[in-house]
């Protein structure tokens, strides 16, 4: 890619869910691991999330979804990334996502799903291993 600097991750809370503690915990863990994190706040539309990721030159998008709308919201974000020629931005997520929904989400193109109780270090390690490496790494 030829891009240098820290990994840039947009952490977003799409949809109507107002519970953002998990998103903030992940955002802080990624930041503390040396990544640049852009937290979009609550009630973001998929369009807003993708616009932010493109404007911020993000390497990845982390979606936190607790509302049960994960199939629709992940699919829309991935569709918009493809439409905007930004499919190289990796999408991962977490929240209340039933085990049975994880394989279909991965088939859609979601790179990883972290369910409740996953240590933050697992998410940090996954991003380091699967999103572009920093110039200093």
Image (tube, rainbow, N blue to C red):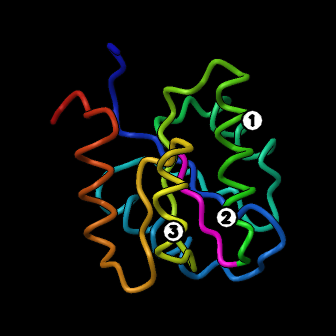
The secondary element bearing badge 2 is classed as: helix
Q: Which residue is mark 2?
A: 70
Give the camera-side residue of 20 and 38.
20
- Earlier residue among tags 2 and 3: 2
Label disc, if present, on residue 14 of the rendered structure: none
Quadrant placement of the C terminus: top left
The residue sitting at the left extreme is 137
Q: Is residue 136 above or below residue 32?
A: above
At a point 76% along the width and 68% down the height, the residue shown is 42
Q: Which residue is mark 3?
A: 94
Q: Which residue is mark 1?
A: 51
Give the main secondary structure of the magenta stretch: strand
Quadrant placement of the N terminus: top left
Q: Which residues are magenta?
A: 61-66
Q: Residues within 10 Å of mark 2 (few under 14, many from 20)?
A: many
Q: Quadrant of residue 12?
A: bottom right
The secondary element bearing badge 1 is classed as: helix
CA–CA distance in space, label 2 to label 3 = 9 Å
Give the camera-side residue of 50 and 108.
108
Q: Is residue 135 magenta?
A: no
**Image coordinates for residue 6, horizontal then vertical, percent:** 35, 38
At a point 58% along the width and 82% down the height, the residue shown is 21
Question: Does residue 92 appear left or right of residue 55 in this picture?
Answer: left
Q: Nearer the viewer, mark 2 or mark 1?
A: 2
Question: Does residue 90 appear left or right of residue 79 in this picture?
Answer: left
Q: Residues within 10 Å of mark 1 (few under 14, many from 20)?
A: some
- Earlier residue among tags 1 and 3: 1
The secondary element bearing badge 3 is classed as: strand
């Amino acid at each position: 890619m030829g891009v240098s600097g820290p990994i840039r991750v947009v952490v977003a809370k799409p949809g109507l869910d107002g519970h953002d503690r998990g998103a903030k915990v992940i955002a802080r863990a990624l930041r503390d691991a040396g990544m640049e994190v852009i937290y979009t706040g609550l009630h973001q539309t998929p369009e807003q999330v993708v616009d932010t990721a493109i404007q911020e030159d993000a390497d990845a998008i982390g979606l936190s979804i607790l509302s049960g709308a994960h199939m629709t919201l992940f699919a829309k974000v991935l569709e918009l990334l493809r439409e905007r020629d930004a499919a190289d931005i990796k999408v991962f997520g977490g929240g209340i996502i039933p085990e049975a929904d994880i394989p279909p989400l991965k088939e859609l193109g979601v790179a990883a799903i972290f369910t409740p109780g996953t240590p933050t270090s697992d998410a940090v390690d996954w991003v380091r291993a699967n999103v572009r490496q920093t110039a200093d790494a």
